[in-house]
Amino acid sequence: MRLNSKIGSFLKYLFLFAVGMALLMLAFRGKNIGEMWEKIRGAKYEWVLLSVFCSFLAYVSRAYRWNMLIQPLGYQPKLSSSLYALMGGYLANLAIPRIGEISRCSALSQSEKIPFNVLIGTVIVERGLDLILLLSSILLAASIEFDTLGGFISENLVKPFYGKAAFLFNSSLFIASIILIVLALVTFIVVLFKKKNQSPFFAKMSSLMQGVLKGLKSVVKMENKGLFLAHTFFIWVMYYFVTYACFFSFAPTQQLGFKAGMFTLAIGGLGMTAPVQGGIGAYHLVVSKGLTLFGIDEADGLAYATIVHTSQTLFVLLMGGISVVMLFLISKKKKSHESH
């Protein structure tokens, strides 16, 4: 059973990677790769380095903000340990989508002896805030460029989704499947509650949920909420400058201003939330198409998206690799101290 589960997980992640590569191929289809490569080679990489530095500041701020959520629960993790765990999580996301949140909690739990379930609760708070800020950036971009963003989302997201959804909801097989799934869930819950007293699984889930709730309450217990909000705002300002700084690295996008930056941050954020490794393909596709609304040729928009995505991915690979090594050394050092 466990082997089948591992094979199933491997096939799922392989499928997601294939989807990402298919989106990447779709984005590059019909483009002159040699011409694009020459444009990318001629980019002003001092602006790209500034973009990477902004992302580094955002990562440090995220680690500090994460510590602010953990400290009210009675734990004092080192900022370096939290940063290593965070970057290790981003590295894991490049291999398996969405696994980074679990892996960073596991890494910090081992290096700082903090209960894993408590850390999961703090990460849920973080992700909730990130979602709010992403939606806020989309609303801000919409308020600035309503027709541009509204038209782009309608043509590239809403209409394709509506067409597929309409087909599904008109399908009797789909409706029957939903009914069966609901019945199966109800049956599972009833059986689970009947066996809860003797079920080890229920006991583990109950313990996990208690820890998660404890982590969620960390926001209420936090003393300096103003600083926490300041870090949250700073993180997203840095995300904006990651996008905006790269405009100046590439001749075709140098004339783009604040509005285009907000628009690109919003649609790029949507691309990065796609359930594929590191947003590969999805980010390239939505940004290259989105920038055409500002008069940028799609091939040039794709070259810009490639510069941003590749530089950020390489930085995560570098920092994530260093972080994994540092976490290993910290864990080894602690085990050595405990044995003595």
Image: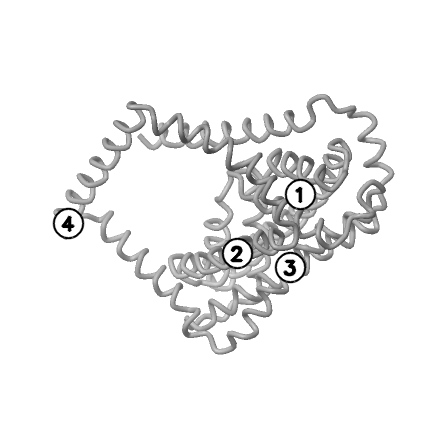
| Extreme residue in the front direction | 147
- Furthest-left residue in this view: 194
Please name which of the two marks, 4 or 1, marks the residue nearer to the observer: 1
Query: Could you tell me residue 270's position as x and y percent?
Result: 57, 44
The disc placed on residue 139 is: none
What kind of residue is marked 3? Answer: Ala
Label 2: which secondary element: helix
Q: Quadrant of residue 309?
A: top right
**For mark 3, what is the residue?**
58
Residue highlighted by disc 1:
313
**Amino acid type at mark 1:** Thr
Q: Residue at x 73, y 55 (%)?
A: 258
Q: In front: 97, or 266?
A: 266
Circle 4 residue: 198
Question: What residue sits right under mark 2 in the picture?
Answer: 130
Task: Determine crowd level at label 4: few under 14, some 14-19, many 20+ residues with C-alpha closer than 10 A.
Answer: few
Please name the colour scheme applied to the rendered image: one colour
Q: State which mark lies toward you, 4 or 3.
A: 3
Image quarter in which the N terminus is found: top left
The three-letter code of the residue at mark 2 reads Asp
State which tag comes first along the sequence, 4 or 1.
4
Q: Earlier in the sequence, mark 3 or mark 2?
A: 3
- Few, some or many C-alpha atoms within 10 Å of disc 2 (few <14, some 14-19, many ≥20)? some
Q: Earlier in the sequence, mark 2 or mark 1?
A: 2
Label 4 close to label 3 by CB (< 8 Å) = no
Q: Earlier in the sequence, mark 3 or mark 1?
A: 3
